[in-house]
């Protein structure tokens, strides 16, 4: 995931660290699902991801301010290109 693909790094330490933390939380959730962890534990993992995402988006808004709308378009395009390069389906 993120650790294997540094192209997802944007070069801003705080945001890159948050991206890494989010990736780690998603990887943890994936392991929990595969190992059939309890619904309670999986819900906690989802809640952890939700909290981290909320904080991360606040960081991005603070960092990028009025440029956020244009950067969202660029970010979306980068992910679409990455998914296509990985041979994955891009949802619409």
Image (tube, rainbow, N blue to C red):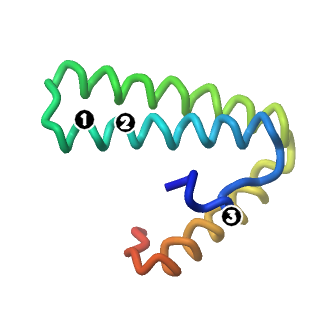
Q: Which mark is residue 28?
A: 2
Instruction: Pick the residue in front: 26 or 80.
Output: 26
User: Mark number for residue 32?
Assistant: 1
Q: Residue at x 62, y 42 (%)?
A: 19
- Picture quadrant where residue 47 is located: top left
Q: Residue furthest front?
A: 4
The one nearer the camera, 31 or 82, is 31
Which residue is at the front of the view, 5 or 88? 5
What percent of the width, then of the height, locates residue 31? 28, 40
Q: Residue at x 56, y 59 (%)?
A: 4
Q: Residues within 10 Å of mark 3 (few under 14, many from 20)?
A: few
**For residue 23, side relative to residue 61 (left or right):** left
- Helix, strand or loop at disc 2? helix
Q: Secondary structure at mark 3?
A: helix
* Residue picked out by circle 3: 7
Q: CA distance from mark 1 to mark 3?
A: 26 Å
Q: What is the quadrant of residue 76 in the picture?
A: bottom right
Q: Residues within 10 Å of mark 2 (few under 14, many from 20)?
A: some
Disc 1 crowd rating (10 Å Cα; few below 14, some 14-19, many 20+) is some
**If you read the primary sequence from the N terminus, does the residue marked by circle 2 or circle 3 appear first?**
3
Q: Is residue 32 above or below residue 77?
A: above
Q: Position of residue 13 (x, y in %)?
A: 80, 39
Asked if residue 23 lies left or right of residue 19, the reply is: left
The C terminus sits in image quarter: bottom left
Q: Are marks 1 and 2 in contact (CB under 8 Å)?
A: yes
Q: Which residue occupies 42% across, 41% down?
A: 26
Q: What element does badge 1 sit on?
A: helix
Question: Residue at 19% of width from left, 19% of height from top?
Answer: 40
Alpha carbon separation for disc pair 1 and 2: 6 Å
User: Residue 85: image x %, image y %?
Assistant: 52, 80
Q: Position of residue 80 (x, y in %)?
A: 55, 72
Sequence order check: which comes first, mark 1 or mark 3? 3
């Amino acid at each position: 995931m993120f650790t294997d693909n540094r192209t997802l790094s944007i070069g801003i330490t705080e945001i890159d660290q948050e991206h890494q933390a989010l990736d780690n939380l998603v990887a943890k959730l994936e392991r929990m699902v595969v190992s059939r962890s309890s619904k309670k534990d999986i819900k906690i993992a989802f809640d952890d991801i939700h909290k981290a995402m909320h904080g991360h988006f606040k960081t991005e808004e603070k960092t990028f301010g009025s440029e956020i709308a244009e950067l969202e378009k660029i970010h979306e395009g980068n992910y679409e290109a990455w998914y296509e390069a990985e041979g994955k389906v891009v949802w619409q």
